Amino acid sequence: PNCPIIPTVTPRRLNDCTFLGNYPFHPHVSLWDSDEPVSRAELLKGVAGAHGLLCLLSDKIDTEVLDAAGPNLKVISTLSVGFDHMAMDEIKKRGVRVGYTPDVLTDATAELTVALLLATARRLPEGVVEVINGGWSTWKPLWLCGYGLSGSTVGVIGLGRIGMAIARRLKPFGVKKLLYSGRTDKSYAAEVEGEYVPLDTLVSESDFVVVSCALTPDTQGLCNKQFFCKMKNTAVFINTSRGAVVNQEDLYRALSSGQIACAGLDVTTPEPLPTDHPLLTLKNCVVLPHIGSATYSTRGIMAELSANNLLAGLQGTDMPSELKF
Ligand SMILES: O=C(O)C(=O)CO
């Protein structure tokens, strides 16, 4: 299943079925069988009395949902590696276990980050539009020039699983220096000759700043006016983590004033970004619709893993990927 399934004791208005598989039990399942998100009202109604909940990162799992589920709820399995959409303190207080999908989306997300970085720095979307619009008059020496990775300094904010996979992929482009910052120095950074530096140093010395950290109270709004003011005028900013790490008003000002060269975002606040958002008026801002992990195989593996996490949680056995918090 690649959509939320809510095992329940009694039939609900979602599509009811029975989960058949090689398991010693066959839970009743209420399945939201659509790529569109389940409505809040339907979720609140459908989750009542459920023992388990499989959700997406677009489903806000807060006190209201937990209260609606009630005391039966034993496990929440999210089809994501990020868990900032869930009220973790409240979930912990209620003793509910949480499954998530780390590792399996690392390669796809790192790949997309590299694609977005190159597309932004080398102005691919602008170039495509010029070809379609007839703006391509002839070969001109400085037309659509951008920035290259060769000989550059790349700064990765958050050298975790995905940050490291991004660094591994960028190094062969001829990156001269790989800086990183975050909560701790990482021994595995040696593989990419990563240098642990304070955030200010990373921001001011990098030609490419790549955000790959989790959204936490510490990182919320981290990329703000002061942050962008420290960046080089020729620097490229890339964010594939969570939109709320960035203050978008400050980013807009940095991009429109020439404080920084360009930005590529796969994540925004809100999602979707309204089509009249000022960022979408800028040629030097490339915005993607949160597709970091969107390959067919990755999404299939995420779906399988999250279903197995859910079933293990229902049975009270070890989950393939349980979030320890
Ligand atoms: O899994 C996540 O947290 C994503 O952002 C999408 O894969």
Image: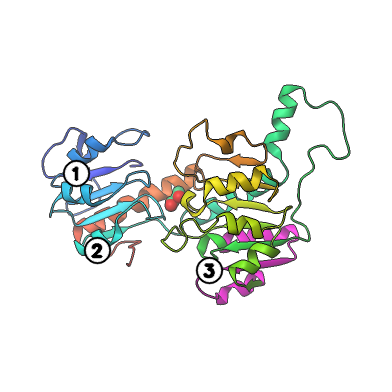
- Label disc, if present, on residue 47 of the rendered structure: 1
Per the image, is 312 magenta?
no
- Between residue 218 and residue 36, name the one nearer to us: 218
Q: Residue at x 36, y 56 (%)?
A: 100
Disc tally is 3
Label 3 CB sits under 8 Å from any ligand 1 atom: no
Q: Splitting the image into 4 quarters, where does residue 187 fall? A: bottom right
What residue span does the magenta drawing correspond to? 164-193
Mark 1 or mark 3: name the one nearer the start of the chain. 1
Q: Please provide percent x and percent y for residue 39.
A: 28, 35
User: Is 287 placed left or right of 17 in the picture?
Assistant: right
Q: Residues within 10 Å of mark 1 (few under 14, many from 20)?
A: many
User: Is 305 placed left or right of 140 in the picture?
Assistant: left
Residue type indicated by callout 1: Val
Label 1 CB sits under 8 Å from any ligand 1 atom: no
Q: Which residue is identified by label 2?
A: 92
Q: Residue at x 30, y 62 (%)?
A: 319
Q: Residue at x 30, y 42 (%)?
A: 4
The quadrant of the rendering that contains the N terminus is top left
Q: Which residue is identified by label 3?
A: 182
Mark 1 or mark 2: name the one nearer the start of the chain. 1
What kind of element bears circle 2? helix
